[in-house]
Amino acid sequence: MSLDFLDEPGPLRADDAFDAAKADAFLKAALPGLGGAPHIRQFPGGASNLTYLLRYSNRELILRCPPRGHKAASAHDMLREARIMAALKPVYPLVPEILAVCEDASVLGAPFYAMERLRGIILRRDMPEGLVLGRDGVRRLCLNVLDQLIALHEVDWKAAGLEALGRGDGYVKRQVEGWTGRYRAARTPDAAEFESVMAWLAARMPLKDSATCLIHNDFRFDNVVLDPEDPLKVIGVLDWEMATLGDPLMDLGNTLAYWVQADDDPVFRSLRRQPTHLKGMLTRDEVIQYYGDRMGQDLPGFSFYLAFGLFRLAVIAQQIYFRYASGETTNPDFASFAQLTHVLEGRA
């Protein structure tokens, strides 16, 4: 294993600190045998839910909990995420194992859960220094990651008894209406208006869903764990907060909202969060073509799904900025998120 490339957490941010003694007491009751006091570190990101490493003398755990402050009613539901992961694990092995769930909000202020740690490589804005895959390796990695999204969409959710994860037909309509309401509720005076985009989406959304399948709803490179022994191999998929039963083309559109490619404009390239600009990576058009070929579908006119993905990303950014503007978090990384909505509005 190459330890140089492992994804490692950083220091605990003051805004995101929690009562370590209470968490430790709960975990030791739920998982007998944990040794010593936990050494706590925090993983980067955490713009939505927060992710920590708790390192005991004999075991490492990942703890997931929601941020403090104003939250959309349906967001940051740790109990739902844990239930989804437990249900998916038997049919989609890349889901980490849930180890303990705390429903008592008095412990840390909100429900939380602990899961196994998958020790591996996570690609963020750039490849880890020294990890060189070459053009052919980058292309193979790109296809391997996309194949895992396709594999999720191909799971027989009815045979697996997962009907309760979704609400059935009408997913696209619910998404357009729901995210429109969330944006208007979170909009601040310095954020983009988005009214013309929201009207366009409402007028052009498909009359019926393309299909119903298991969807991740936040599938991107920094939610994928790679094998340290073989960086082209996916060994885990993280962040199942928004997973549900829904339209797979909406899932693909959400993934492509993050897909910044080498020939994009400089402003959009500056916002890149994953290394999709590298030589060998598929372009957005090539991703759509590859997905359609693998799924046996012709996908002309994908503009609605691309525009929706950009809009939804703007809503997520604005909800985070709303908490920052309200003083509910002081994380400086969120200070520019209102400006991000203007960039996303222009692209949408």
Image (cartoon, rainbow, N blue to C red):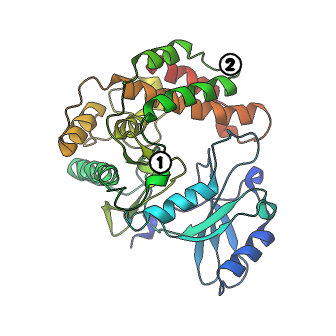
Disc 2 residue type? Answer: Asp
Q: Is residue 210 toward the left or the right of residue 268 in the image?
A: left
Q: Mark 2 or mark 1: name the one nearer the start of the chain.
A: 2
32 relative to 153 in the view: left or right = right
Q: In this rendering, would 61 be left or right of 156?
A: right
Q: Residue at 58% x, 35% y: name it.
A: 316
Q: Nearer the viewer, residue 29 or 36?
A: 29
Horizontally, is 276 left or right of 271 in the view? Answer: left
Which numbered disc covers residue 118? Answer: none
Q: Judging from the image, what secondary structure is the residue with disc 2 in?
A: loop
Locate residue 44, reporting x and y percent. Answer: 59, 52
Q: Position of residue 304 (x, y in %)?
A: 37, 24
Q: CA distance from mark 2 to mark 1?
A: 32 Å
Query: Which residue is identified by label 2?
Result: 190
Q: For the point 28% across and 34% down, which residue is it?
A: 283
Most foreground residue, 186 or 47: 186
Question: Horizontal and vertical percent for residue 94?
Answer: 40, 63
Image vertical order of residue 37 relative to residue 249, above or below:
below
| Extreme-bottom residue of the structure | 33
Q: Residue at x 71, y 42 (%)?
A: 331
Give the class, few, some or many, for how many residues have Cα within 10 Å of label 2's Cα (few <14, many ≥20).
few
- Which amino acid does the dot numbered 1 rest on? Thr
| Residue 43 shows in this picture | no
Tags 2 and 1 in contact by the CB under 8 Å rule? Answer: no
In the rendered image, which quarter contains the C terminus?
A: top left
The disc placed on residue 244 is 1
| Closer to viewer: mark 2 or mark 1 | 1
The quarter holding residue 249 reads: top left
Q: Quadrant of the N terminus?
A: bottom left
Find numbered disc 1 in the image and state the secondary structure of the residue it sits on: strand
Tell which of 191 and 200 is nearer to you: 200
